[in-house]
Image (cartoon, rainbow, N blue to C red):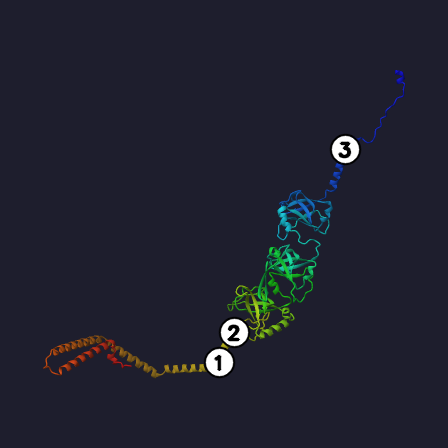
Amino acid sequence: MTDTADAGPRTEAEVHRGRWPGLVWAIPIAALMIAAWLGLRALTNRGVSIELIVPSATGVRTGDTHVDYNGLEIGSVSDIRLADDHRNIALTLRIDSAQKSLFRTGTRLWVVGANPSFTNIASLRAAVAGPSIGVAPGPGEPERHFVAVRDAPVIVAGTPGRHFVLTAPDLVSITPGTSIYTHGVPVGTIAGIRPVGLTGFKVDAFVREPYVQLVTRSSHFWDANAFQITRTAGGLQARLTSPSIAALGGVSFETPADAADKSPAPPHARFQLYPDAGSAAAAPIGPETLYQVALGGDVGGLFAGAPVMLRGYTVGRVVATQAIFEPETGLIRTPVTIAIDGTRLHVAPTRDAVDAIVARMVARGLRAKLTQSPPFIGAYTVTLDPKAGGAGRLRPGSPWPWLPAAGDDDMFAKVNGILTKVDQLPIAAIGANLRGVTANLRTLTGSPELRDSLTHLDGALGTLDSTLKQASPKIGPLLQSLQQTATEAQGAAAAANRTLGGGGGAQDADLPAAIRQLTEAARSIRSLTDYLSRHPEALLRGKKEPK
């Protein structure tokens, strides 16, 4: 049975080797393919490297500081190192390949938040949340190396509008980003400011479409303030401007209703930036005609740009004030130069036309004077008063004619009055009389009779003086002797009166009468003594007659 089994048919196995290694190798192969794909994707999406030089990297972090374009993140900071000049910082920016076309010659980059400003809300937000890199594309060729600008550009490239140039000696509340308004509506932005030597600044003012048509050749720009004071029929009116102007400042412009030229201003047209609305209202709207005036009082508080008023209307402005010392006379003159706008007077703005109407008003009494509005505390202005004087005229002067000021007529009237009175004096007759008096005095003082009279008078006075000197030692004893005699006579009269009054009837009847006479004699002697005591000169001149 064994042989029979062994003699049966046999099956043989054949080994075939395939190209697929088997399922066991599927997972490693899939992992390799995924890694290769990721590597290829990383290689293709690596982007471009941009080098940015900044003065400071404060707050900048690799991987955290993003590069933004109009709010879209297009890259980030991949490296921070010291620049080759050892003063600045070099940032390496990794930018998306799809956005590499933004980086060309003329592209501006800046660190948002490096210079916070109230006019740029993004800079305030970045100062709190952390800085970022801003981008403003340029029009040139591809570029990979940039130097950061200090401030972000205010106007986005391609914004429709028009740029104008404003000039001002100083700027109070105006910075790049300050809004521009007309009639309270924001229509533009201050794009930039740059100095012009030592005389002031140039301001780049950008006005957007369609408002650009509101800027005419006669428009007036001024620095808008939180409070605006205007003149009305009832006096001065103050009002608060928009909250944005009050908080951030602003520039306003308007075109005067009676402006001569209201055609649209061309690009980059130049305008003066006035410090306030009042100065802008006093600004000329046409060619000006200049005059000089010598105002009374202190004109140190009168500044260039102050309005020239006529019947409450602005017709011109103050151009300049001066203080001139004249060494020859020692006088100080303060001439004021004013400009009158003929357009505001509704006459042709030429020298001849304005001179003609001003001369006519001066002939009817117009005078210039210095005023304050409000009185005592307001700003100084020049007022043309149509009835401040009498008939006058423009006086020729250099370089401009002189406009008479209030008070000149009074001075001239006083001078003329004095000259009139001097002319009325009989000077010739007075001179002849004086010559006659002088001659009489000369004749009188030279006559012989006057010399003889003076000689006799001098002798008489000498004699009188000698007599008084001789009589003076004797007057005293004489008066004392008379006083003693009167006393003795009065005593004797009293004794006799006592004796006779004793009652004897045989006395002689005539004795009392004799005693009375003796008493009266003593009284007379005493009176004489008293008189001589008061008037010793009576011994020489006699007693004065009573008046």
- Crowdedness of circle 1 by 10 Å Cα count: few (<14), some, many (20+)? few
Along the polypeptide, which appears first: circle 1 or circle 3? 3
Along the polypeptide, which appears first: circle 2 or circle 1? 2
The picture places residue 95, in percent across and down from the top left corner, at 71, 45
- Would you place residue 119 above or below residue 23 in this image? below
For residue 150, say whether it is visible: no
Viewer-side label of 1, 3: 3
The residue lying toward the viewer, choosing from 434 and 356, is: 356
The picture places residue 281, in percent across and down from the top left corner, at 61, 64
Quarter of the image with the C terminus in it: bottom left
SS of the residue under disc 3: helix
Question: How many numbered marks does the figure carry?
Answer: 3
Viewer-side label of 2, 1: 2
Q: Return the residue at label 3.
A: 27
Q: Return the residue at label 1.
A: 424
SS of the residue under disc 2: helix
Distance CA(mark 2)–CA(mark 1):
21 Å
Q: Specify the amino acid type for callout 3.
A: Ile
- Crowdedness of circle 3 by 10 Å Cα count: few (<14), some, many (20+)? few
The picture places residue 544, in percent across and down from the top left corner, at 27, 81
Quarter of the image with the N terminus in it: top right
Left-right relation of 419 to 493? right
